Image (spheres, coloured by chain):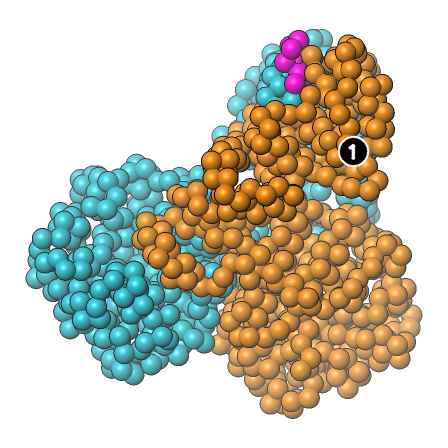
Chain colours: A cyan, B orange
Amino acid sequence: MTFDVYDTTLRDGAQQEGMNLTVADKLAIAPLLDELGVGFIEGGWPGAIPKDTEFFRRARTELILKNAVLAAFGSTRKAGVAVADDPQVRALLDSEAAVLTLVAKSDVRHVERALKTSRAEGLAMITDTVRFLVAEGRRVILDAEHFFDGYRFDPVFATDAARAAFDAGAEVVTLCDTNGGMLPDRVTDVVGALRAALGEGPRLGMHAHNDTGCAVANSLAAVDAGASHVQGCVNGYGERTGNADLVAIVANLELKLGMDLLADGGLRESTRIAHAIAEITNIAPFQRQPYVGASAFAHKGGLHAAAIKVDPDLYQHIDPKAVGNDMRMLVSDMAGRAAVELKGRELGFDLTGQAELLTRVTNRVKESEAGGYTYDAADASFELLLREELTGERPAYFEVESWRTIVETQPGQGQGRGALASAEATVKLRAGGERFVSTGEGNGPVNALDQALRLALTRIYPEIDRFELTDFKVRILDTEQGTDSTTRVLVVTTDGERTWSTVGVGPNIIEASWEALLDAHVFGLLHAGVEPR
Amino acid sequence: MTFDVYDTTLRDGAQQEGMNLTVADKLAIAPLLDELGVGFIEGGWPGAIPKDTEFFRRARTELILKNAVLAAFGSTRKAGVAVADDPQVRALLDSEAAVLTLVAKSDVRHVERALKTSRAEGLAMITDTVRFLVAEGRRVILDAEHFFDGYRFDPVFATDAARAAFDAGAEVVTLCDTNGGMLPDRVTDVVGALRAALGEGPRLGMHAHNDTGCAVANSLAAVDAGASHVQGCVNGYGERTGNADLVAIVANLELKLGMDLLADGGLRESTRIAHAIAEITNIAPFQRQPYVGASAFAHKGGLHAAAIKVDPDLYQHIDPKAVGNDMRMLVSDMAGRAAVELKGRELGFDLTGQAELLTRVTNRVKESEAGGYTYDAADASFELLLREELTGERPAYFEVESWRTIVETQPGQGQGRGALASAEATVKLRAGGERFVSTGEGNGPVNALDQALRLALTRIYPEIDRFELTDFKVRILDTEQGTDSTTRVLVVTTDGERTWSTVGVGPNIIEASWEALLDAHVFGLLHAGVEPR
């Protein structure tokens, strides 16, 4: 059976708020989609968007796809214009894409109210454009816009629109829930009714949006009702609430329903590929994203940890490796000794049978969390805590004597909005048998402290030059007390290969940040294999 | 017909990675859930988690709910222990919650492999615990853990578990897709089969997780198959991929299927409430979240904009006002001016017909928001901005010359965890024709700055003594840049009667806080009817 996985990340996904893909971005994403193993990559709308015209031009020489076929998106001809004279249709041919996907109105209200033309002309626009492009040797897919709303309002026109496309030579008619308002049982009803009208031969597709939170389920409902083509976007990108998440749809069809859809078993690479695409779009990945999210197989509840120790399958719906993801244990005050033991194993410490140690660590985690710490987002601080309990000490890379940070405005610059303040910090510490007094500047007190600390340490531990702060999060706890409250800071650091998170807590942000910074440097040195000097 | 909307944000939602709610957080979230109009608020697991024990203790006097009933979560008795002797069960009674929700194993594999006990004892644990608590006068809901996986493996045991709970007096048995691996048609099959076995009387509930991306659809499928109780979390919080998004479920049931579920038409407030809860959890809202997300009704595509000008319903699946959200055109300022006009009216300024002023204010809001400001949580700062555009100036209560803040440790006190730092600030300003130089101390730099500012101003404006900072929130924007990022601070101030919120943004937390503090004092003086002296 022919079944198409059709990706529209580069076209409909790019309509997401805040996303702005360059031609180079698109040329970098397309090979990742190809590696994922989709059958079609919709690259954009040549002729309507200049960047997309350019993308198809460069794709001819710069893009080598091993699995996917590139598709260009466009519209049926304008009302009252001969198809051969429509520049937008000509631009589709000029793109040289082998597959052309045409959007067409299948809701008669849109024909009459938005296009302000007749039913007959609405259907002729479909017939003419499909026939013209097929005669030019192209494969044509018709995206029937607003199909579900249109069918519910006027099933005759919607059915005629689909039939017109098939009669003119379209290979698939995709039913689009353009406004995203459908629920699965309505999708089942409409797809079933349309198949009853058209017969089993014509191939139907599904294009869902997530406005009801049901895009994935709506896509599955359409497949169950006989659709053999699904459209979606990696990471669920798209206008409003996004398009259907293509990886989630495929994972459900492959892992739950036994279908085999992606080339080269691409699903096993989907976590890495989804994250790589997020790096290019520069949209932070959603941690709770099904299958590929950072939290998708992360366990925190105490009940879960106890059972997972017995058998991981008791609390996992699939093996995370099937989508290239990993199980992670989160340590928190909800977790008991089992979670600490599993987390220890994940970090490379075998704590089996060390009941007394496990109790000590668990209690220390609970006390610390009661005081504002959180370890589920700070693996590195947890590992330092665990090592300290195992060995009785922390690695003594350096000894801080004192530190100070000053933020001040220049005279006349203190008046509120846009006050220009400078920040400076001084750190005094001993390392490698020497005493260092160093001063750093920054755009804020924490940045200045970090600079001063690095300046002092780098003379003894040049390895620190590779460490870079990549994220910094602040949470005020016990907010009832205004500025008297406790502050928690999470810091993410990378050495270019590995990334680690540390936590600090204190009565103010500077102290909390200082603690997280120290943990970050200690952890980094430890994992670089550096001995205290 | 009885139908329960059961919120578990404070219990299962709190198992989300990175979420760590304090007792104060829970006491602040519960009234928002009550305002949303849910029937039940599950507050936590007293006896197992010390913070939750404390929450129920404080809730008795501090929490007044007008719609919802508070439920405590716990477990059936341990295997081989008499129910009256199980301290965890006693803690449930001690919580004084009127509704107790018991988690129980309904998958025989969990009984045998995780609990390592017999089928008979597994069922007796349910019977004994439900009967005991019902005899103590409590309403009992049974959360049948792993029900779907369990039913598919051994329908007899799963059915017996549900039957045991009903026979012992449970009012609802909630079928939990604990691992989140279900698809809608499987939910339909299992709920249908169970109802066939139990008859129409016993009330079934649904508790879904989003691991397949189908949590909302699975909840709808269960309701369609006869469930009359749905559980979920606001913002879809929860372990792994999260629990079912309660607002999306309810919006689908109310707006698409015509049910009437939330008290006082709470759905119309759901966007505001979901965002307010996100402020407390300090987890950035997901912009593509169905119904309440910032992008949920934001239109970017050119096709959409053209049609929406004709008729907004052509590209919207519902009226956004039904969930308290707004349509936004990402390329037009039409929606912006209308919002400013409405907001102005809310604050007591009639801006009808003042097109030029509205454009000016809208543009300034857009520029500011692009720079990191946010006015939906900072009414007072917005009012100052609006007044400034109306009158051409800000009230000149004082003129700041410069400020400085220092945080430093004592020698020998700089070593990380528990470093004891002191904070001091100096402010130089002119007010009432005099120049003041004042120094304040605090447990952090912002607290010290606030003290210094007050000390200077209070000599001219004694009204300031009544102002008190009650909340202080920090959010780091553009987190890719680590400590180089932009900081947004929200400050909440009260004079004992009125409470107001101000915002500040800057390259570092001190500058951002300073700006928000200045706005807070200016707004307070203005609304106290004080003229510049």
Q: Position of residue A319 (x, y in %)?
A: 52, 60
Instruction: Identify the residue shown where x is 79% and y is 75%.
Output: B140
* Helix, strand or loop for disc 1: loop
> Could you tell whether B6 is left or right of A22 in the image?
right
Determine which quarter of the picture holds residue A455. Answer: top right
Kind of residue sitting beneath label 1: Ala
Provide residue A520's location: percent of width, then percent of height. Answer: 64, 29
Q: Nearer the viewer, residue A295 or A409?
A: A409
Would residue A408 be counted in the magenta stretch? yes
- The image quadrant where one finds the C terminus of chain A is top right
Tell me where the magenta segment starts and ends, as one range: A406-415
The residue shown at (62%, 19%) is: A419
Residue identifier under label 1: B528
The quadrant the N terminus of chain A occupies is bottom left
Q: As rendered, which of B393 and A321 lies closer to the eye?
A: B393
Q: Is residue A366 above or below residue A3?
A: above
Instruction: Write the residue at 50% across / 43% down.
Output: B353
Residue A179: x %, y % from top left: 40, 62
- Pointer 1 indicates a residue of which chain? B
- Overall secondary structure of the magenta section: loop
Percent x, y of residue A401: 77, 15
Give the answer, above or below, for where A503 lies relative to B196.
above
- A221 vs A279: above or below: below
